[in-house]
Amino acid sequence: MDALLTALADPARWRLVGLLAERPRSVGVLAQLAGARQPQTTKHLQTLERAGVVTSQRSGQRRVYALRSAPLRDLAAELGRLADTADQTGETYDRYGLGLQAERLAAAEPGWADGRSFRFRRSLAGRPELVWRHLTEAALLARWWTPDDLRVSELVFEARPGGRIVQEYRDAEDTDGSDPVAGRAEGVVEEARPGERLAYRLSPLLPGGGLAFTAHVDLGLRPAGAGTELDVHWRIADSTVDSADFIAGIEIGFGQSLDKLAAALVADTDPRSAK
């Protein structure tokens, strides 16, 4: 595939591919139609042949080249697959970009987002006792408490009133820590009733170390058959002008985190996972 892409990247060779798509042609005719010298055209055709996209044969005194469609179809299929993947991932990126523009315009003065709230609800596998562990135990929290494409790099969660919270995350593919930290937040647990309610305040940190805003987060758990209904309420306070980028990502980012929580609980309650 690399050889094919390299061969097709040259405008002169791409012009020859277009001419050969119409019908097989000799080197001389191709040179005339392309407005190029024959030796130069021969070299281009040889490159295309080595890449597997054209084939040639001797016909009398002439060498005639023909286009092979299979490599082009393979390339088209691969490009289509990449485009489909980009459609799936790009939608979230575009949504965040639109929200980011709106929030930056709104962030005119301190306190601009105070009182804003976000609500999340999920029907989760597992009883409230199991869900509580995933909400409060650091090893389990680390499996889900980041948006997509990020990983937890530091985590402290003391599940008691007054307990300390530290959350730091990096790009999931940054294995050696050379990329800048993607985000860091610090907070305090306000209420912890196992299996029922967890409340805490959490403040993302700005690059200079100041607080971007304070999120008051309230998580309620309710039994529902063999599972649990989770109701999460975010309320924003102490918002700074520089907090727009953070607030723009709450709905998408925390929603992705909860989706990962739901998937982790399904895996933990699947009998097949214990085998």
Image (cartoon, rainbow, N blue to C red):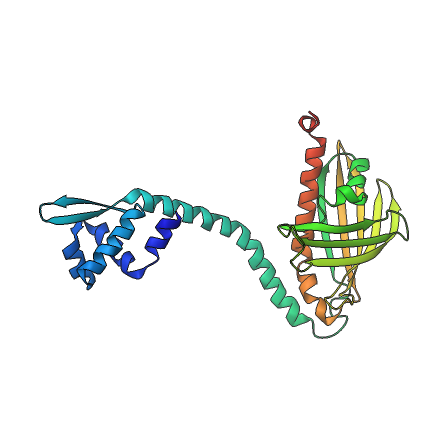
Q: Is residue 112 above or below residue 251?
A: below
- Number of callouts in the render? 0
Asked where in the image residue 59 lies, by quadrant, the reply is: top left
Asked where in the image residue 182 lies, by quadrant, the reply is: bottom right
Left or right: 221 as drawn, with respect to 95: right
Q: Residue furthest left?
A: 60
Taking depth in this image into account, of 6 and 100 the one nearest to the observer is: 6
Left or right: 173 as drawn, with respect to 152: left
Asked where in the image residue 102 lies, by quadrant, the reply is: bottom right
Residue 230 in view (yes/no): no
Looking at the picture, how far across and down is residue 44, in whole percent? Answer: 26, 56
Q: Residue furthest right?
A: 161
Looking at the picture, how far across and down is residue 158, in whole percent? Answer: 86, 48
Looking at the picture, how far across and down is residue 271, in whole percent? Answer: 69, 26
Taking depth in this image into account, of 71 and 255 the one nearest to the observer is: 71
State the quadrant of the C terminus. Answer: top right
Looking at the picture, how far across and down is residue 155, in whole percent? Answer: 78, 50
